[in-house]
Amino acid sequence: MKRKMISCASALFFLAVFNCKRDEPDPECRDASCCLPFFNAYVEYIRDEPASLTGPPYFSNYGFQFSRKFPSRPLRKGYVTDLSDICNKSLYKIQGLPLTHKNVFPADSFPYRVSGKLVDWTQEKLVDLPIFTLYIDKIEKIN
């Protein structure tokens, strides 16, 4: 009887340790694991932030410029930016939305309110600034 219990306990242990679903990204992207989790780290959740939308053909990829800088609590002085790329898994949420500005920086209007998970590139960088990507949970045009 004791031998059977040890075998069952061992089997449960190995099932828990070697679970195939352990490394799969969260389908709802609650922890931003759907945006290249091996290269990005979760920074913060932003809610209803004013933003302008940029993208092709004026820029190489789609992104946001925010009305304020992130992260809210910088890791060190000067480690902030108001720019963010958009996670590939949430690009479908901006389909049909007009671009805010073409090649004018800084943006002069912020017609969108965006909520989502902000992640930062953790690999090598040329400069000590954050490289953000946003997984969009919600976007709405207010103008």
Image (tube, rainbow, N blue to C red):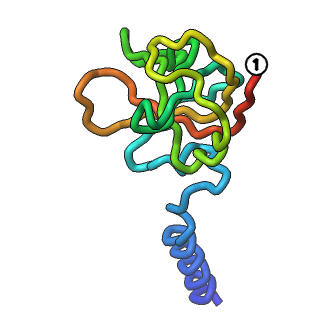
Q: Is residue 111 above or below residue 63?
A: above
Percent position (x, y) of residue 16? 56, 69
Q: Residue at x 41, y 18 (%)?
A: 75
The outermost residue toward the left is: 126
Q: Residues within 10 Å of mark 1 (few under 14, many from 20)?
A: few
For residue 127, above or below residue 63: above
Q: Closest to the observer: 84 or 75?
A: 84
Where does residue 15 sit, x and y in percent of width and height?
Answer: 56, 75
Q: Left of 40 or right of it: where is 22?
A: right
Kind of residue sitting beneath label 1: Asn
Q: Residue 120: which quarter of the image?
A: top left
Q: Residue at x 49, y 33 (%)?
A: 55
- Does 100 sit above or below residue 32? above
Q: Residue at x 52, y 43 (%)?
A: 87
Residue found 45% across the figure and 48% down from its top:
37
Q: Quadrant of the N terminus?
A: bottom right
Estimate the x, y position of residue 83 in percent, counting from the top left: 47, 23
Camera-nearest residue between 32 and 91? 91
- The one of 99 and 128 positioned closer to us in this rendering: 99
Task: Give how far across and how far down residue 140 sits, in percent.
Answer: 74, 30
What number of labels is visible? 1
Q: Is residue 73 above or below residue 124?
A: above
Residue wearing tag 1: 143
Q: Quadrant of the C terminus?
A: top right
Kindly state the secondary structure of the residue where label 1 is placed.
Answer: loop
Quick one: 16 or 87, which is closer to the camera?
87
